[in-house]
Image (cartoon, rainbow, N blue to C red):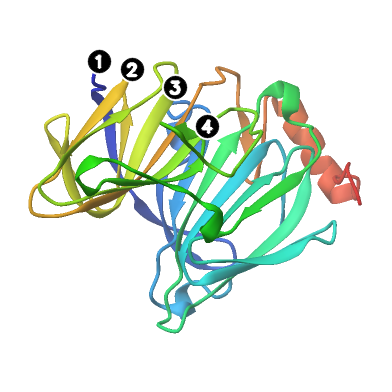
Amino acid sequence: MQDRRIKTILTAQPVLEGAGVHLKRAFGYYEIPQFDPFLLFDDFRNDKPELYLKGFPWHPHRGIETITYMLEGSAEHGDSMGNSGVIRGGDVQWMTAGSGIIHQEMPKPDEKGRMYGFQLWSNLPSTHKMMAPRYQDIKKEDIPTAEETGGVKLKIICGSYGNTTGPVKDIITNPQYFDIFVPANSEFVLKTRQEDNCFIYVFEGEATIDNKILANTQIALFESGDSITIKTNDYSFRCLFISGKPLNEPIAWGGPIVMNTDAELKTAFAEYHNGTFIKDKK
C-alpha cells in the first residue's frame, strides 16, 4: 500500500452566515478546486444559542448537494415544495438541490444549549446539475458502525468500508463519508480509494498523520495513495473522513448556486427573481 502524504493543512476560520449564525469554515470558495468534487465545509458547533438561533431563512440552491450531519441539538427544515422535518443528534440529511430548491434551516439547542454539527457542499457534474431535487433523511439508528481491531470504530454514512455499507444511496459522485474514532495509544491504517480526492476534518483529540500533529478544527487534504495511517498517543481521536472522485469541470459559483458557466449562473438568479426558479414541483 502507498500511504497518502498530506498536501495541505488548514484551520477552520470564524465566519458569519445566514441571518447571523456564527460558525467555522474549513474550506470554501477560495480553496476551489483543491477539494474537488467538494466545495465547502462548515463546522457549526456552538454552545451559545444567541449565536445561532436566527438560523438560515429561506434561500435557494441549484447545482449542488448539501450534507448536514448533526451531533447535538436539532435543525428544523422546510422547502418550497412542502417538504419539512427535523434532524436531531446523530442524524444526517443529504439534500440534492439539482435543478433548484428554496428552503430554510432553523437550528434548535439541546437541553444544554448545544447545537453541534457539520455541513458539506458537494458539487454535481454538468450532466446532473438540473436533476430533480430530492432528500435522503437518515436517522442515527440506521447508520452502521464498522469495528476494527484495537477499538477503532467507523460510522459509515455514505459509501462502504470492508463489509459495511452506509445508508445514503445512489449519489452521483459516489462519495465516502465516515465518522472515525481511534482510541488513545493506537495506530490505524485507513484504506482509501486510489482515484479519490480525500480529506479528514478533526473534531476531537489529536493524532499524528504523515509526521504531522492534527487537532480540533484542522483539516488535512491528501495527495494520492491508497491508505492513511493515523497514530494516537495520550488522546483519543475523532474525525470525519470524506472522499470523492474529482469532476474536473469548470465552476461558476454565486452564493448558494454553483453552475459550470457564468451564463448558467445568471440564468439561475434571473429565474429566482422572476419566480421560475423551481423546475420540479410536487
> What secondary structure is found at the residue carrying circle 2?
loop
Report the amino acid beneath label 2.
Answer: Ser
Marked residue nearer the N-terminal end (2 or 1): 1
Percent of width and height locating residue 95? 66, 47
Measured in 3D between alpha carbons, the distance from the residue under mark 1 to the one under mark 4, in whole angstroms, is 21 Å
Measured in 3D between alpha carbons, the distance from the residue under mark 4 to the one under mark 3, in whole angstroms, is 8 Å
Residue highlighted by disc 3: 196
Percent of width and height locating residue 248? 55, 17
**Mark 2 in CB contact with mark 1 (< 8 angstroms):** yes
Q: Residues within 10 Å of mark 2 (few under 14, many from 20)?
A: some
> What secondary structure is found at the residue carrying circle 4?
loop
Q: Where 190 falls versus 90 (above or below)?
A: above
Measured in 3D between alpha carbons, the distance from the residue under mark 2 to the one under mark 3, in whole angstroms, is 8 Å
> What secondary structure is found at the residue carrying circle 1?
loop
Residue highlighted by disc 4: 175
Measured in 3D between alpha carbons, the distance from the residue under mark 1 to the one under mark 3, in whole angstroms, is 14 Å
Q: Is residue 197 left or right of residue 218?
A: right
Marked residue nearer the N-terminal end (1 or 3): 1
Report the amino acid beneath label 1.
Answer: Gln
At x 23%, y 51%, the residue is: 237
Q: Where 216 falls versus 125 (above or below)?
A: below
**Mark 1 in CB contact with mark 3 (< 8 angstroms):** no
Q: Is residue 61 left or right of residue 181?
A: right
Q: Is residue 251 left or right of residue 58?
A: left
Q: Is residue 194 visible?
A: yes
Q: Quadrant of the rendered structure where residue 22 is?
A: bottom left
Report the amino acid beneath label 4.
Answer: Pro
Report the amino acid beneath label 3.
Answer: Asp
At x 72%, y 40%, the residue is: 62
Percent of width and height locating residue 262? 70, 27
Marked residue nearer the N-terminal end (2 or 4): 4
